[in-house]
Image (cartoon, rainbow, N blue to C red):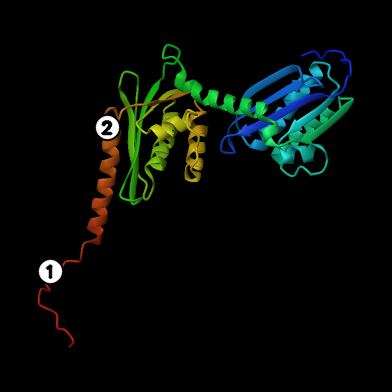
Amino acid sequence: MTRTSKAPDTGPAHIYVDGGSRDNPGPSGIAYLIKSPDEKTTIAKKAKYIGRATNNIAEYTAVLEALSRALDLGIKNVLVRSDSDLVVKQLSGRYRVKNPKLRDLYLACKREIDAFDRFRIEHIPRDKNKEADKMVRDIIKARLQKAANTPKSRFKPDGIIYVAGGSKGILEHSAAAFVIATPDNTVLAMSAKYLGARSPNIAEYAAIYLATKKARSLGLRKILIRSDNQLVAKQLTGQFAVKSDKLNKPYSECIKALESFDKFAVQIIPRNSNKVARKMVSGTMKDYMKEERGSRAPASSEGNDQPQARNE
């Protein structure tokens, strides 16, 4: 884009930036607002989904894109406001950039900063950055919900995946299972795995992860996941936040796996529409418990059925 000539300087334009990641690293977004010096006018604003990243990478990306846009608009005097203490202190020279993954973004920001006549950056509390923060959260949520809300006429999967995860007892036994089929119900693959002591939700995430791994090996690029676990399905589509620390890692792994496909959707189905995968889960746990009981059976006393003497 061609950058315009210098705009009249009536004080610094105020630039609010924010970058955020769900689960850090995880699905990430950036946002910025460029406002007039009196903040009565919003000159430009943007929110963008940037894929899988960390909070700091997202924040630097937001700063870089905001500075680039300001220069394109001919703005040469800016005050950047961010709620990231790390990024503010690094760009103002108070902290060194030790993370090699941030260094390229830092240097790119510094090159843009050098093009301004005046540049200042300051840290603000999160509650003073509500608009940019909301834009980030909204863009991430919209991206995760997009697949689930895509009309069927525009989304024709080459694979339909039924997944199930379950447990028996109080975190005693669990298993995951999946069935991968074509849209005309030709089964391409099916598998079940015993997981040990896991919760039903962790087992469900495991089923999805294992299924996506198999789907990639089959060359599938557009998949429809069908699950009867409402919590997991709604977390993957951004309708529910992941509040449990124990689910953060499996959630992030599944999001990363799903985003490797050209298109994916997650659909909630009734439990009775998921009978095959459910039966595989219960059967796998039963088989394991049967083997476990067999290994604990007392040794045979055949050939030695005389009562043993006791010391009295």
Q: In the figure, 97 relative to 51: above or below?
A: below
When the figure is inspected, residue 186 is found, relative to residue 199, above or below; the finding is above
Residue 35 in view: yes
Residue 276: which numbered mark, if any?
A: 2
Which residue is more in the foreground, 206 or 213?
A: 206
Whether residue 221 is visible here, answered yes or no, is no
Q: Quadrant of residue 134?
A: top right
Q: Residues within 10 Å of mark 2 (few under 14, many from 20)?
A: some
129, 20: nearer the viewer: 129
Give the residue type that dot 2 points to.
Val
Tell me what residue is drawn at x 80 percent, y 33 percent: 121
Query: Under tag 1, what secondary structure?
Result: loop
Instruction: Tell me the amino acid under the disc marked 1.
Output: Glu
Name the residue: 35% across, 21% down: 182
The front one of 210 and 38 is 38
Mark linked to residue 302: 1
Q: Residue at x 73, y 24 (%)?
A: 65
In primary-sequence order, the first of circles 2 and 1 is 2
Give the camera-side residue of 123 and 267: 123
Badge nearest the viewer, 2 or 1: 2
Q: Position of residue 269 (x, y in %)?
A: 34, 26
Q: Is residue 27 left or right of residue 80?
A: left
